Image: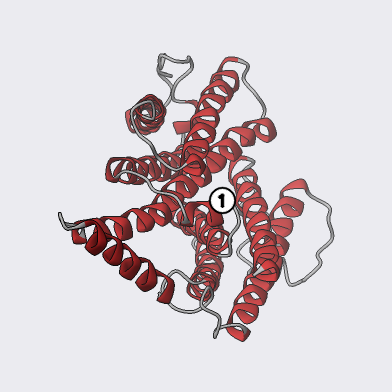
Amino acid sequence: MSSLRRLSFFAFFVACAHLVFGAIVRISGSGMGCGDNWPKCYGYWFPPFNRPDLVIEVSHRYLASILLVSLIALFVAAWRRRDEPEVRGRGGVLRSAGLAVTLGFTAAILGAVTVKLGNPPLATVAHWTVAMSLVATAAASIIRAGGLGGLSARTGVVSIQTKRATLGAAAMALTAVVMGGLTAKFPGASVACLAFPLCGPNPDVLPGAVHIQLTHRAIALLLILHLFGQLMMQRTRRDAPVVRRALAIAFALGIAQLLVAGAMIGMRLPPVLRSLHEAMGVSLWISTFVLAYLARVANGGASREAVAIPHFSPAPRSTMTDSVAVIVARGADQ
């Protein structure tokens, strides 16, 4: 599994770089740097690098090509080892690798549609959402291959309350990042609020832009409060250590994102530095997804234990010993 883990990590890092670079394309207004030409840029695979917007856009496309190659390589490697228990079937690397390839081509097609339509906000946000799903799927492949705490999670147990709460955190993080993409793309939304943490609405933008900005902020704040609440609840829960660490990391990234957002608005950062805000948002989405996925994997162990416990009933000592032996033997056979 070590080779699959390395390939999964490589694909994951390329997907993260591609996602962050896509944020730079959007914030800098370079989405039409190659005009409406796709996949070539003004008829060239390697056009003259004579404009910043062209350089940013075509570099984003080159990263997309590298990402597709890495995803295909991961899927081929998993397919060649499909007879191994950790690779095939539900929970195996093969299925997540295949989904990642599908999402990779879907993102490429949406990128082409976005360019052909002139880079409209809704098409751009759809492209952004699929790209975030792709990086999450790459993270799932790593966990299934034993990385990012995947091995530890398989032997751990979490409460059903934690499992539900982590799913809620991942859903809120995804919604917040999608709204962040819409805020960056919708006319006037990125400058709709001139103050932080209060809005201080900009009278020069449409009310709809202010509503988008406020919705983005509200969801982000609710996410941070939710993570803080779950962190406090760990005092009374005995969840797997790997899940607790992932929760602490997600909360720390949420606080860091809050500070970056305040600095971005208060210091009037330029577009390149504002992309740090979206990079932190991506990191927060990945961390909450990994948290939820680790809780899901660990909860599988909890379910198995819950099935075994009801088989115990009051019995003589010798009978109880025999029952334990039978259950252990059955577990070994599985």
Indicate left or right for 93 with 49 as reference: left
Count of marks placed on residues: 1
The percent position of residue 82, horizontal first and vertical second, equals 55, 83
- Kind of residue at disc 1: Gly
- Quarter of the picture containing the C terminus is bottom left
State which quadrant residue 218 falls in.
Answer: top left
The percent position of residue 108, horizontal first and vertical second, equals 56, 68
Secondary element type, mark 1: loop
Indicate left or right for 210 with 79 as reference: left
Query: Which residue is the site of mark 1?
Result: 149
State which quadrant residue 179 falls in.
Answer: top left
Question: Closest to the observer: 169 or 105?
Answer: 169
Indicate left or right for 199 with 264 as reference: left
Disc 1 crowd rating (10 Å Cα; few below 14, some 14-19, many 20+) is many
Question: Closest to the observer: 307 or 244?
Answer: 307
Q: Is residue 185 at all visible to an observer of this figure?
A: no
Seen in the picture, residue 94 relative to 225 is either above or below; the reply is below
Seen in the picture, residue 325 relative to 54 is either above or below; the reply is below
Q: Is residue 108 at all visible to an observer of this figure?
A: yes
The percent position of residue 29, horizontal first and vertical second, equals 61, 44
Who's the residue at 60% across and 45% down the image?
23
The percent position of residue 120, horizontal first and vertical second, equals 46, 53
Who's the residue at 53% across and 63% down the image?
144
Who's the residue at 63% across and 37% down the image?
275
